[in-house]
Image (cartoon, helix red, strand yellow):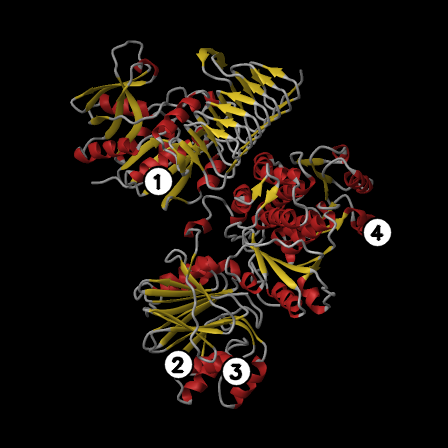
């Protein structure tokens, strides 16, 4: 996935504004970056590698112009290189284009263009767009009509922006990839995500699929692909620009781990009446008691979905969690089920496809997301916001905790109302997370296992998704091999991998049957001399078999899973920090994946 | 020349406020229902300060996490004092980020913006002075850093003088030029600490101009845990509260739920996400922090209940300070002061203190705390316990 920005109306600062925006979007992709500025001509500068490579290159060059676009890239077509970086230009260098997404029919289009004499510089799908525009211009079209003609010709998913030599506007269009406009007096912006221009304005317009926008210094207009005018409402974003700063922490991820108590408070705020025994989700007019629930999600959100499915099952409502990509491939019968998409960004392509698939077959859909105005929030019948605030670290941390809290609210509001214990546990959660953060010894334990051959995470019940998430976090930011298993599955195969060099991180909370069985599994691995790190609330006797203990406060089983996860986040973070990894931007990963 | 930058000293623990400072520094303790440091920042920003440098140290994460990179759109720049070796040492940490005249205030004392404005005004009227400090009248100057002021010049500064000759004390609000850093470096350490007041004394002795301006508008200093109750009373009396007023002296956040059959007695402030159950009586002089629960038929009077405190049904709580995440079960009794309280080696007699209950204490049902009890963080008091005196951190107490 990539990040795009654009700016018109800041004559002497265009380049600075673009570079600022790109730095805010770097989390979306970072194997190359580039900018194009239009005045009488179009000037392009682009570099492979992190944004600083481009910054260094720009120090020696004077790029002027009051109309500009910029791009950070995460490769999908063609290896990272200067040549494959965006922006791309036409043969004459009169049009520059940036693109986030995939053009599915690019080979056909490219063959036609090459046959017509166009010369291509790169391996990318994107480059067909400036050439398509060029040929429309050659046929006498205006820039706007040439842009439209190109959009009509391509198929796939995209957020695209283009500038023209001698032009005073940026043209952009959206299909299945995020694109927002920022509106200020005398200047207009565009970007994949609001933080890119939040410092300059808090007024935004979310474009919808199939819309084309023209922005210039005086303002904006939005039309359909066919050219009909569209009324768009201007939203005001509530968080301020500096919420996306690192405020003294070494990494965004550590900051976001520490922010969890606050994020959880925001999630719960005004929604829980413990003494009255009710939950109010204002986004849900009349919370339906679903007869069945199907969750669809990817990555960390899938782990949250597994947790959510268990909450509904516990309330006697059939519920399943599906990987969104698999759901699309072989859709299960939805019947009367409510289909719930869990996606932090609200733009995850696989999850959107799964929801569209379900909706196409008549199912009601609900989105659980962090981003107001995101695609998923607009496409689903219902939406619940997790209110975690912006998350910059590529590896999700606080948004997972907030997803779990919001899933509890959702379950309490629709399936098991009146559960005062559950409501009380939610209200106690922020301070308990704070207690775990304050007292965690994960950093000291992490140091002892930097040379491990692999890491295994086990848990049962609600702690099973936590084990999966713990392993995923470790993989993402340490590049070490890690796997999560349902504790009961260990002896059905994975135990063969367990040695004295593979620490096993076991999550056991409460003193019930689940905990006792997990302790039994721990004895199995201990017999193979594997070091055991127990995450426990001290109610079972797991400590007796553990080499290290990461304690959590004694609490409700539902919230215990959230607390255990905080210990695993810290374990992964400190392991990665000791190994000197690029924690906020792990290799090969992007924050939200907007391609399937 | 106007002052745009302020340095806020917020690195200290506040030993005498233990056990409340187990998990956070003194500036993050509550005055009414907000951290002291918020009032300090408010006063600076209201006085026109545009950039704030915060010197943090002890439990610095708590400050950074609470405020993040800005407060009320003013940029906060954090510098770290790894070891707390005195106020002068703390200020030196800010040297690399300050390059013009600046204000210095302590982060652990509630101040009014007028006081800041007065010190800025004095500095601007006498820009050549090496230092300008706010001073205030105090009937018992012997307990503090006393000063002698003559025609706007500070002629003497002395810590805890043993005579009754002094009527003015150093308010801890200063304006300095950047030359102060060199003066601090040239100051000798005392007991291993580099103190700002020693630097000022040195400047005065060497005939450098040190100006003083009389100010008022300083809240009582929170040195001991019971002072938090006094400071809170003062703040409520002045109405320095953010929550919307329901009626005179009763402030309730919109997200809080107060049962129709509960009674709020002015002055009282109820922070965000709180719940107050039926039959409960809260106030007067009570501040409920965020997400506090007062269950049915409980009574809370003259108390500060910090974030996530939970008071069980039928409990009676007077003159009490709770830390964060404290749970008191059903029918607890904290009957209130006066009490003789021991802090370190000293006994403070007749203090209006019911109890100090530190972070994450968990009490079962029918627990009674005698006046002046200090309960350490994480302690568990089992049902029926009657406790008094000092209870250690993480202690388990039965009977």
Q: Is residue A3 left or right of residue A309?
A: left
Distance from Cα at disc 2 to Cα at disc 3: 15 Å
Q: Position of residue B1 (x, y in %)?
A: 20, 40
SS at circle 2: helix
Q: Quadrant of the C terminus of chain B?
A: top right
Label 1 sits on residue:
B52
Label 3 sits on residue:
A153
Q: Is residue B253 left or right of residue B147?
A: right
Up-down: is A243 above or below A322?
A: above
Q: Is residue B9 left or right of residue B378?
A: left
Label 2 sits on residue:
A143
Up-down: is B51 above or below A337?
A: above
**Residue for point 82% across, 42% down:** A524
Local crowd at mark 3 within 10 Å, few (<14), some, or many (≥20)?
A: few
Pointers 4 and 1 in contact (C-beta within 8 Å) = no
Same subunit, labels 3 and 1: the answer reads no
Q: Position of residue A295 (x, y in %)?
A: 67, 58
The count of marks equals 4
């Amino acid at each position: 996935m990539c990040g795009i920005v654009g700016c018109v109306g800041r004559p002497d600062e265009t380049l600075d504004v673009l570079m600022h925006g790109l730095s805010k979007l770097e989390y979306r992709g970072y194997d190359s970056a580039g900018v194009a500025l239009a005045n009488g001509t179009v000037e392009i500068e682009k570099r492979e590698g992190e944004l600083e490579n481009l910054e260094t290159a720009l120090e020696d060059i004077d790029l002027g112009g009051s109309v500009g676009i910029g791009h950070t890239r995460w490769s999908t077509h063609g290896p990272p290189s200067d040549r494959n970086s965006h922006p791309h230009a036409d043969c004459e260098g009169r049009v520059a284009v940036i693109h986030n997404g995939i053009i599915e029919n690019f080979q056909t289009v490219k063959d036609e263009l090459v046959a017509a004499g166009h010369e291509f510089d790169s391996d990318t799908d994107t480059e067909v767009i400036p050439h398509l525009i060029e040929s429309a211009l050659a046929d006498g079209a205006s820039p706007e009509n040439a842009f439209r003609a190109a959009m009509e010709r391509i198929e796939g998913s995209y957020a695209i922006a283009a500038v023209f030599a001698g032009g005073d506007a940026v043209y952009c269009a959206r299909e299945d990839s995020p694109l927002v406009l920022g509106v200020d007096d005398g200047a207009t912006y565009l970007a994949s995500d609001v933080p890119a221009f939040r410092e300059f304005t808090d007024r935004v317009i979310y474009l919808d699929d199939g819309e084309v926008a023209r922005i210039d210094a005086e303002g904006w207009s939005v039309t359909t692909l066919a050219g009909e005018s569209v009324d768009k409402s201007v939203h005001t974003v509530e968080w301020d620009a500096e919420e996306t700063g690192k405020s003294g922490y070494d990494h965004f991820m550590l900051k976001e781990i520490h922010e969890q108590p606050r994020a959880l408070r925001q999630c719960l705020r005004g929604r829980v009446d413990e003494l009255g025994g009710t939950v109010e989700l204002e986004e849900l007019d009349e919370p339906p008691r679903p007869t069945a629930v199907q969750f669809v999600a990817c990555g960390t959100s899938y782990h949250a979905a597994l947790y959510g499915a268990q909450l509904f099952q516990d309330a006697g409502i059939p519920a399943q969690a599906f990987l969104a990509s698999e759901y699309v491939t072989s859709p299960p019968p939805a019947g009367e089920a409510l289909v719930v998409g869990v996606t932090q960004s609200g733009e995850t392509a696989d999850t959107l496809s799964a929801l569209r698939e379900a909706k196409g077959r008549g199912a009601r859909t609900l989105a659980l997301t962090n981003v107001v105005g995101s695609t998923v929030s607009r496409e689903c019948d219902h939406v619940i916001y997790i209110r975690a605030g912006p998350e910059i670290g590529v590896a999700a941390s606080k948004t997972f905790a907030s997803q779990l809290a919001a899933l509890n609210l959702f379950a309490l509001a629709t399936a098991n109302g009146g559960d005062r214990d559950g409501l009380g546990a939610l209200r106690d959660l922020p301070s308990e997370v704070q207690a775990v953060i304050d007292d965690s010894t994960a950093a000291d334990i992490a140091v002892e296992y930097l040379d491990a051959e692999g890491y295994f995470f086990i848990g049962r019940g609600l702690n099973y998704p936590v084990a999966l998430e713990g392993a995923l976090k470790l993989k993402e930011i340490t590049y070490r091999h890690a796997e999560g298993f349902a504790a009961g599955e260990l002896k059905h195969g994975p135990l063969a991998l367990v040695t004295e060099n593979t620490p096993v991180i076991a999550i056991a909370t409460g003193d019930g049957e689940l905990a006792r069985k997990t302790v039994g599994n721990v004895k199995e691995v201990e017999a193979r001399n594997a070091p055991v790190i127990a995450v426990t609330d001290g109610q079972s006797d797991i400590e007796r078999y553990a080499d290290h203990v990461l304690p959590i406060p004694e609490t409700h089983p539902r919230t215990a899973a959230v607390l255990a996860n905080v210990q695993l986040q810290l374990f992964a973070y400190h392991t990665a920090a000791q190994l000197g990894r690029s924690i906020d931007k792990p290799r090969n990963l992007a924050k939200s994946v907007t391609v399937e | 020349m106007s002052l745009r930058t302020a340095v806020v000293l917020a690195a200290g623990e506040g030993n005498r406020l233990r056990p409340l400072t187990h998990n956070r520094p003194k500036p993050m303790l509550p005055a009414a229902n907000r951290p002291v440091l918020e009032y300090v920042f408010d006063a600076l920003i209201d006085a026109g300060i545009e950039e704030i440098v915060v010197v943090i140290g002890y439990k610095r994460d708590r400050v950074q996490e609470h405020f993040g990179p800005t407060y009320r759109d003013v940029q906060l720049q954090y510098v770290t004092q790894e070891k707390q070796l005195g106020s002068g040492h703390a200020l030196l940490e800010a040297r690399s980020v300050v390059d013009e005249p600046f204000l210095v205030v302590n982060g652990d004392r509630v101040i009014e913006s007028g006081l800041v404005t007065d010190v800025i005004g004095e500095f601007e009227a006498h820009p050549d002075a090496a230092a300008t400090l706010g001073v205030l009248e105090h009937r018992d100057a012997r307990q503090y850093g006393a000063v002698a002021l003559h025609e706007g010049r500070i002629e003497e500064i002395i810590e805890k003088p043993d005579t009754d000759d002094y009527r003015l004390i150093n308010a801890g609000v200063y304006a300095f030029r950047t030359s102060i850093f060199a003066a601090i470096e040239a100051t000798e350490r005392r007991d291993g600490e580099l103190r700002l007041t020693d630097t000022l004394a040195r400047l005065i002795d060497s005939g450098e101009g040190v100006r003083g301006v009389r100010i008022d508008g300083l809240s009582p200093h929170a040195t001991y845990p019971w002072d938090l109750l006094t400071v809170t009373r003062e703040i409520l009396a002045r109405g320095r509260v953010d929550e919307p007023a329901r009626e005179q002296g009763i402030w309730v956040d919109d997200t809080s739920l107060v049962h129709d059959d509960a009674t709020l007695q002015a002055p009282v402030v109820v922070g965000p996400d709180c719940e107050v159950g039926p039959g409960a009586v809260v106030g007067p002089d009570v501040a409920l922090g965020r997400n506090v629960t007062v269950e049915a038929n409980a009574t809370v009077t003259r108390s500060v209940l910090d974030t996530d405190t939970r008071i069980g049904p039928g409990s009676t709580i007077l003159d009490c300070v709770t830390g964060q995440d404290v749970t008191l079960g059903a029918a607890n009794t904290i009957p209130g002061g006066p009490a003789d309280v021991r802090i370190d080696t000293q006994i403070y007699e007749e203090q209006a203190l019911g109890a100090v209950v530190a972070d994450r204490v968990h009490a079962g049902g029918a627990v009674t705390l005698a006046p002046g009890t200090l309960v350490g963080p994480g302690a568990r008091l089992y049902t029926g316990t009657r406790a008094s005196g000092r209870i250690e951190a993480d202690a388990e107490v039965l009977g």
